[in-house]
Image (tube, rainbow, N blue to C red):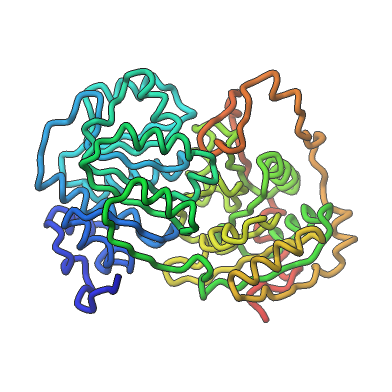
Amino acid sequence: MIESPFVTKFTDLGLADPLLKALASKGYSDPTPIQRQSIPPLLQGRDLCGIAQTGTGKTAAFALPSLQYFMNNPKPRPLAGCRMLVLSPTRELASQIATSFRDYGRFLQLSVETVFGGVPVGRQISKLRAGVDILVATPGRLLDLIDQRALTLKDVEIFVLDEADQMLDLGFIHALKRIDKLLPRKRQTLFFSATMPKTIAELGDRFLTDPVKVAVTPVASTAERVKQFAIHINQAEKQALLTLTLQAEPIDRALVFTRTKHGADRVVKHLHAAGIGCAAIHGNKSQPQRTQALQAFRSGEIKILVATDIAARGIDVSGVSHVFNFELPNVPEQYVHRIGRTARAGREGIAVSFVAEDERPYLRAIERLTRVRLDPMPLPENFDARKAALPKPSAPVRQHDPRAQQRGPRANPAREGERTPGGDRPKRPFRRGGKSGVGAHKGAVRKFGQR
């Protein structure tokens, strides 16, 4: 779809005054490309299929016209039901979407609720009893509530499926097909995905009717303002390299990506031993732990957040200066998602990948996809001596014990974004760095911004 050259402000899109007032209160005046392309046809009631990554402004693209629809079509809230359903693959993204709806609809009398795993279901049942206007949900908990007869979808007028590619990655295909059968045929449907391979397109055909198609930021492109580096290193030495780098490099906020939940915990334990304040976020953390870690990261109480891809999906934190790929993803598109979390809002960013010998094929696949060669970077000076001087964790790092899954709830990697095994919440899931924390020992490693 071609953007209109005459649409340069939100005031040009035909949005109602309460929505424009809410946008102005947040300092928003210029719509993003996905918003310019999506809002006009959505205001006309069309279905929409959008190819857009997190960070392109797609939440406002579907929230604003939906809120205007409710303004123009007031109805009582359906008992134990909702008028709009937004499906999200993860809890964090669901919470973020709900917050956006509340911000944009702050001058409207509309109710917004979220339902997802990891929190007591009884509280969610109580909130749904009188009905809600807008419900943001993850598929598993949504179906749990439907099975308990605490929720019906028969009154849904607008349905949004967000991050469809991630839904399939998490194994939600059967849940989505079941939800499709429970929705009314007459509805407006919005379908968003960062990529559109054949399987995603077929899923879209199942939900959509004569949709408008829009696309922004092709997945193969990477942010122009992100400087990308690769350091070749043995797997066993990656932890020392990360610790020394975080001690030497000036960091505003940094995301560190690992491939596994247990790997994220090991990284955090070693960083804590070196006095570097950080926290991990992944599917084995309780919802309060994840929320607390994100709040500390956003506020600047901690500058380092260690995450798995699934848990980090949808996290939109401003001011991320660095992304570290502690382990390269085996799906090259995921690399694009990772580094896209820096260099936002006109800022520059730095992405550094630690590449072990067995990860070189992943690196080649990433460079083929992005058509960008990652600049090679040497190890820090005196690396072996400085590595040997690093403090070790006070207790042995716990390795994954397969018997643990037999003692507790079974963990399903395909549902990491939603299910959380039980466990007590620690009093402090992260620590502030001491003298050897982030920003100390400046100059020990060449600045990544230098060529």
Quadrant for the N terminus in the image: bottom left
The answer to whether one can see residue 24 in this image is no
Q: Position of residue 223 (x, y in %)?
A: 51, 71
Query: Where residue 210 sits: x, y (%)?
Result: 26, 56
Q: Establish if 445 lies above or below 436.
A: below
For the point 71% across and 59% down, the residue is 247
In the depicted view, which residue is nearer to us: 158 or 27? Answer: 158
Which quarter of the rendered picture does the C terminus lie within? bottom right
Residue 162: % across, % down? 39, 48
**Apparent side of residue 406 relative to residue 320 in the rendered image (left or right):** right
Residue occupying the far bottom of the picture = 451
Q: Is residue 385 left or right of residue 192?
A: right
The one nearer the camera, 8 or 203, is 203
Q: Is 223 positioned to the left or the right of 241 in the image?
A: left
Residue at x-position 34% and y-position 34%: 181
- At x 12% / y 56%, what residue is drawn? 16
